Structure formats: structure tokens, C-alpha cells
Amino acid sequence: MQHYDVVIVGGAMMGSSVAWHLLRAGVPGQRILIVERDPSYEDASTSHSNSCIRQQFTTEVNIRISLYGAEVVRNFRALADDPEAPQPRLQEFGYLYLAGSEAAAANLARAQALQAGLGAGTVLMTPEEVQAAYPFYDLSGIHLCSLGTRDEGYFDGAAIFDHWRRSARRQGVEFRQGEVGEVTLAGDRVASVGLTDGSRVGCDWLVNAAGPRAARVAAMAGLQLPVEPRKRYTYVFDAERPLPRDLPLTVDPSGVHVRTDGTGYMAGCKPVEDGPVDPDDFDIDHTLWEEMVWPAIAARIPSFEAIRLRRVWAGHYAYNTLDQNAVVGPHDRVENFLFVNGFSGHGLQQAPAMGRGIAEWITQGRWATLDLSDLSYARIAAGKPLCELAVI
């Protein structure tokens, strides 16, 4: 039986980030194994992501994580210290949150004060101020708005993922196609992992980066994780009358969001019945576009009454049903089982901080640069949620 310092279950954005940061922390590549069920990543959440980044969260830890993520995206090539590293583009059209009630406006104001106090470039605007800057909106029924003026928008997450994965492989990290079928404990530690092909590998650390399948992996070790696949839809369309400037990612009170996407536009939403689905379920509910998405965006932006739908796809959130926040770090009993799960749609933008954090925990036994203890498994065990209110 081969033995590795670290076995990572899942090789998409999060697993590759962990591996790359472990290399930076001094763990030899040949002592790291990534087990990935589909090395094409065709159906991975990474491949179906809209690859956006924002600081407009309601919890301090998430704001700090995304501030660091924006720093990494802006300076990726320099921070990677690798001439082969790309320099991803960050298209800063910002996020625009619209509050449709006085209660929602109060929540928006509290969140913006926290964001600005931590260094984020968010500002509150009245509907009249937004209308002056973006005259194409119909802001009927809106009480208050919050706009991100920097470090918010779309980035080339695929380029970062590709570099992390290729760089890890080049430096000796082993990528093995397969699926974990068994996790064996010796006392209160993971001793080995069995794959469905009958092979088995030993490990000092097991990192669960299995995305929507994370709860299945945890259950193999007898651990409970409140993470399940939730379906999300993305629609790409052209407008007969394109807008005169970039459209911020506009989060409407209806729950629909829409933004600029190259020369066209991209909208998204959750299903009407938002419950768990099979991780292989990518079926499209076409009634959502006609009955929910298009009416919402056409009402908010009248120019979108005449549009042509070009593409639609479904992806999965690894949805934390307790509080929609990530679960990161060791289990409170099985200490060498590490979670990096439950990002509820924020995984790509949080991947830099998560990979660095897990690498620090493995090599130093602590969160060295950014305290991620608020996201620990302890709150899951205690049933004490750290609720994130700004989940799209």
C-alpha cells in the first residue's frame, strides 16, 4: 500500500489550490495524491461556475477572504513567482445589490458599513443616484442600493485553475483517476483510503475537496457534514438594444441576478423548489426562463424586453444547509480529516484563501495569515450557525 503525506479527494479548483499551496509550503510533490473521479472536469462545479468575485458579504471572515482573493487575482503572476503563470483579467463591473424593503435596506446598510470598515470599496447609493449613473434601470420599489466600486466582477478562474493543476503535476503531485469508496480509521485518525477500483492508499492527512459529493466522503469516515448539491441555472443572452455601459452584477429582490458577459449578458437564478438533487442531475427546467428570469430582468431593465437566449446550463452549489458558509479545517474528533467544503456558490473566489489556509494547517498546525476559525467544524458539531445573508 502506497503512503502519502496528503491525500486530496477532488482535483478541481479547491483541490488543486490545496495541492499548489502545499508545494509552496514545502511539502514535496511526490508525497501528495489527488484522487479525481473525472479528470476532464466536464461536470465539476468549477467548470459550471460564473467565476465572479465580490466583497459584499455580511460576515467579516468572508469579506476578508474575498479581499485576499481579489489581491491574488490582481497579482497572480507575481505572487506565483512563475514565468509560466498567467495574469488573469479582472473585469470590474461591480455588484449592485437592490433592497426592495425597509428591512432589506437596513440589512444592506449594516453590511456595507462592515465591508467598508474592512477596506472594501462598497458604497451606498439612493435609487436616484443609481438612476443618474445607470439610466437604463427601472428602480421602482427599490429603497436603497449598494455598489462595489473596485475588486468586484468577473475573473478568469479557468486560467488560475489550469495553472494550479499543471504546476502541481509538473512538481510531482500525483493525479489518479478514481473514486473514493472507503475511509478507514485507526482510532481517531484516518489511516487509509480505499478506491472503488480495489486499490488502497495510506495517508497522514485526508483533505475532503469533493464539492457537491463532500457529504458522501465525510460519511465514509462516520462524519456528518450538512452539505448537499443544489441546482443553479445560468442563462447567456444578447440584447437587441445593448446597454451603453457595462452592467453591474445586479442582484434583484426577486432573487434573479444579471450582469455583463463580454458583448452579451448573463443571468442566473435558483429553482422554485430549491432542494437537494443528485450530483449527476444537470437537467434544465426551461419554464424558469419564461416564467421567472426573463420577466424579472425585463422589468428591471426595459431594454431587455427584446433579447435572444444563446445558451443555458445548470450547475451545482455545494450548499451548506446550516448557514451557507464554508466548513474548513479539521474535524473536532478525527483531527487529520480536513474539510474544505460547503462554499454555497463562493468557491472559486474563496479558493486562494482556502488553499493557503489548509496548507498552513497541515504544515504549521494553525491559521497563520488569515484566521479561518469562524468556519471550523466546531460550529457544525455545536449546531451554532454563522449565517451568511448575502447568498445569491
Image: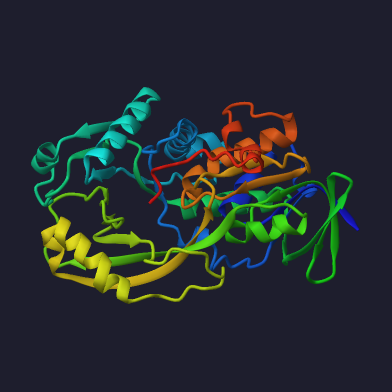
**Horizontally, is 186 left or right of 363 in the view?**
right
Residue in the picture at 31% in, 55% down: 255
Q: Is residue 242 visible?
A: no
Q: How is the image coloured?
A: rainbow
**Horizontally, is 79 left or right of 95 in the view?**
right
Q: Examine the rendered structure and indicate whether residue 4 appears above or below residue 73.
A: below
Residue in the picture at 11% in, 60% down: 302
Residue 303 position, x and y percent, is 11, 61
Residue 380 position, x and y percent, is 62, 43
Residue in the picture at 60% in, 46% down: 17
Q: Is residue 297 visible?
A: yes
Comparing 331 with 19, the one in front is 331
Q: Quadrant of residue 217?
A: bottom right
Comparing 43 with 128, the one in front is 128
Residue 100 position, x and y percent, is 22, 46
Q: Examine the rendered structure and indicate whether residue 267 appears above or below residue 321.
A: below
Q: Quadrant of residue 184?
A: bottom right
**Horizontally, is 260 left or right of 341 in the view?**
left
Q: Examine the rendered structure and indicate whether residue 364 appears above or below residue 51.
A: above
**Horizontally, is 215 left or right of 319 in the view?**
right
* Extreme-top residue of the structure: 117
Comparing 336 with 274, the one in front is 274
Where's the N terminus, which quadrant? bottom right
Residue 201 position, x and y percent, is 84, 57
Count how many numbered circles sit on residues in the image: 0
